[in-house]
Image: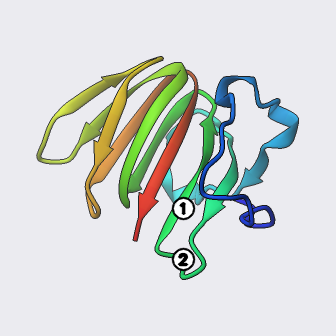
Amino acid sequence: MSTSDHTAPASFAVSVADVPDSELEAEELDPAQIVSGTPVVTGKVLWEAEDGSQIRGIWQITPGVVTDTEANELFVVVGGRATIEVEGGATLEVGPGSACVLREGDRTTWTVHETLRKAYHISY
Protein backbone atom coordinates (compact mmCIF):
# COMPACT_ATOMS: atom_id res chain seq x y z
CA MET A 1 0.00 0.00 0.00
CA SER A 2 1.08 3.52 -0.58
CA THR A 3 1.97 5.61 2.40
CA SER A 4 2.15 8.76 0.31
CA ASP A 5 -1.07 10.18 1.74
CA HIS A 6 -0.76 9.43 5.44
CA THR A 7 -0.85 13.11 6.40
CA ALA A 8 -4.66 13.11 6.48
CA PRO A 9 -6.11 14.18 9.82
CA ALA A 10 -7.09 11.48 12.31
CA SER A 11 -10.74 12.53 11.94
CA PHE A 12 -12.12 12.07 8.45
CA ALA A 13 -14.85 10.34 6.45
CA VAL A 14 -14.47 8.32 3.26
CA SER A 15 -17.08 6.36 1.32
CA VAL A 16 -14.94 3.22 1.05
CA ALA A 17 -17.33 1.55 -1.38
CA ASP A 18 -17.15 4.55 -3.74
CA VAL A 19 -13.35 4.91 -3.98
CA PRO A 20 -12.63 4.02 -7.63
CA ASP A 21 -10.40 1.00 -8.33
CA SER A 22 -8.13 3.43 -10.20
CA GLU A 23 -7.27 5.13 -6.88
CA LEU A 24 -6.12 1.84 -5.33
CA GLU A 25 -2.47 0.94 -5.74
CA ALA A 26 -1.20 -2.51 -6.67
CA GLU A 27 0.29 -4.50 -3.81
CA GLU A 28 2.80 -7.30 -4.19
CA LEU A 29 1.39 -10.73 -3.38
CA ASP A 30 4.04 -13.36 -2.68
CA PRO A 31 3.48 -16.17 -5.22
CA ALA A 32 4.01 -18.67 -2.37
CA GLN A 33 0.79 -17.36 -0.77
CA ILE A 34 -1.36 -18.18 -3.81
CA VAL A 35 -3.12 -21.53 -3.45
CA SER A 36 -5.31 -21.18 -6.56
CA GLY A 37 -6.54 -18.64 -9.06
CA THR A 38 -4.85 -15.38 -10.00
CA PRO A 39 -5.86 -13.00 -7.19
CA VAL A 40 -4.81 -9.37 -7.44
CA VAL A 41 -4.40 -7.21 -4.33
CA THR A 42 -4.78 -3.42 -4.31
CA GLY A 43 -5.17 -0.87 -1.55
CA LYS A 44 -4.85 2.64 -0.27
CA VAL A 45 -3.52 3.88 3.05
CA LEU A 46 -5.84 6.55 4.43
CA TRP A 47 -3.91 7.28 7.62
CA GLU A 48 -0.77 6.05 9.35
CA ALA A 49 0.54 6.94 12.80
CA GLU A 50 3.85 8.82 12.70
CA ASP A 51 5.52 6.01 14.66
CA GLY A 52 4.07 3.33 12.36
CA SER A 53 2.14 1.67 15.20
CA GLN A 54 -1.26 1.99 13.50
CA ILE A 55 -2.50 2.10 9.94
CA ARG A 56 -5.97 2.60 8.46
CA GLY A 57 -7.00 2.09 4.89
CA ILE A 58 -8.81 0.28 2.10
CA TRP A 59 -7.78 -3.17 0.88
CA GLN A 60 -9.16 -5.19 -2.01
CA ILE A 61 -8.54 -8.69 -3.42
CA THR A 62 -9.98 -10.37 -6.50
CA PRO A 63 -11.22 -13.99 -6.45
CA GLY A 64 -8.81 -16.81 -5.65
CA VAL A 65 -7.38 -18.62 -2.66
CA VAL A 66 -4.45 -17.22 -0.66
CA THR A 67 -2.75 -17.85 2.66
CA ASP A 68 -1.56 -15.19 5.09
CA THR A 69 -0.18 -14.61 8.55
CA GLU A 70 -2.28 -11.87 10.09
CA ALA A 71 -1.56 -8.65 11.93
CA ASN A 72 -3.72 -7.37 14.82
CA GLU A 73 -6.58 -6.15 12.65
CA LEU A 74 -10.18 -5.00 12.76
CA PHE A 75 -11.90 -4.68 9.40
CA VAL A 76 -15.37 -4.15 7.94
CA VAL A 77 -16.26 -5.63 4.57
CA VAL A 78 -17.94 -3.14 2.24
CA GLY A 79 -18.20 -5.38 -0.82
CA GLY A 80 -17.67 -8.95 -1.95
CA ARG A 81 -17.55 -12.25 -0.10
CA ALA A 82 -14.89 -14.55 1.30
CA THR A 83 -14.40 -17.52 3.58
CA ILE A 84 -11.50 -17.11 5.99
CA GLU A 85 -10.23 -20.29 7.63
CA VAL A 86 -8.17 -19.61 10.75
CA GLU A 87 -5.71 -22.45 11.37
CA GLY A 88 -6.74 -24.19 14.59
CA GLY A 89 -9.75 -21.90 14.92
CA ALA A 90 -12.95 -20.70 13.33
CA THR A 91 -14.06 -20.52 9.72
CA LEU A 92 -15.39 -17.03 9.08
CA GLU A 93 -17.90 -16.22 6.35
CA VAL A 94 -17.64 -12.51 5.56
CA GLY A 95 -19.59 -10.22 3.27
CA PRO A 96 -20.87 -6.64 3.14
CA GLY A 97 -21.36 -5.32 6.66
CA SER A 98 -19.29 -8.04 8.35
CA ALA A 99 -16.94 -6.80 11.06
CA CYS A 100 -14.00 -9.12 11.65
CA VAL A 101 -11.14 -9.25 14.14
CA LEU A 102 -7.96 -11.17 13.32
CA ARG A 103 -5.26 -11.72 15.90
CA GLU A 104 -1.60 -11.09 15.22
CA GLY A 105 0.00 -14.35 14.15
CA ASP A 106 -3.24 -16.03 13.02
CA ARG A 107 -2.44 -18.22 10.02
CA THR A 108 -5.30 -17.96 7.57
CA THR A 109 -6.54 -19.24 4.23
CA TRP A 110 -8.75 -16.80 2.35
CA THR A 111 -11.13 -18.17 -0.29
CA VAL A 112 -12.34 -15.06 -2.08
CA HIS A 113 -15.64 -15.80 -3.84
CA GLU A 114 -16.33 -12.25 -5.10
CA THR A 115 -13.86 -9.34 -5.19
CA LEU A 116 -13.62 -8.32 -1.55
CA ARG A 117 -13.12 -4.74 -0.39
CA LYS A 118 -12.63 -3.83 3.25
CA ALA A 119 -11.87 -0.84 5.44
CA TYR A 120 -9.27 -1.82 8.02
CA HIS A 121 -7.39 -0.71 11.12
CA ILE A 122 -4.14 -2.51 11.98
CA SER A 123 -2.20 -2.06 15.23
CA TYR A 124 1.44 -3.17 15.37
Q: Is residue 32 above or below residue 116?
A: below
- Which label belongs to residue 55? 1
| Near-viewer residue (97 or 31) | 97
- Residue 121: x %, y % from top left: 47, 52
Is the C terminus in the top left, top right, bottom left or bottom right quadrant?
Answer: bottom left
| Near-viewer residue (124 or 60) | 124
Is 101 situated left or right of 54 in this image?
A: left
Q: Is residue 67 above or below residue 97?
A: below
- Residue 99: x %, y % from top left: 35, 30
Q: Is residue 68 above or below residue 22?
A: below
Residue 19, visible in the rendered structure: yes
Q: Amino acid at mark 2?
A: Gly
Q: Residues within 10 Å of mark 1 (few under 14, many from 20)?
A: some
- Which label belongs to residue 52? 2
Residue 34, visible in the rendered structure: no
The structure residue drawn at horizontal position 58% and vertical position 32%, both measured from the top left corner, is 37
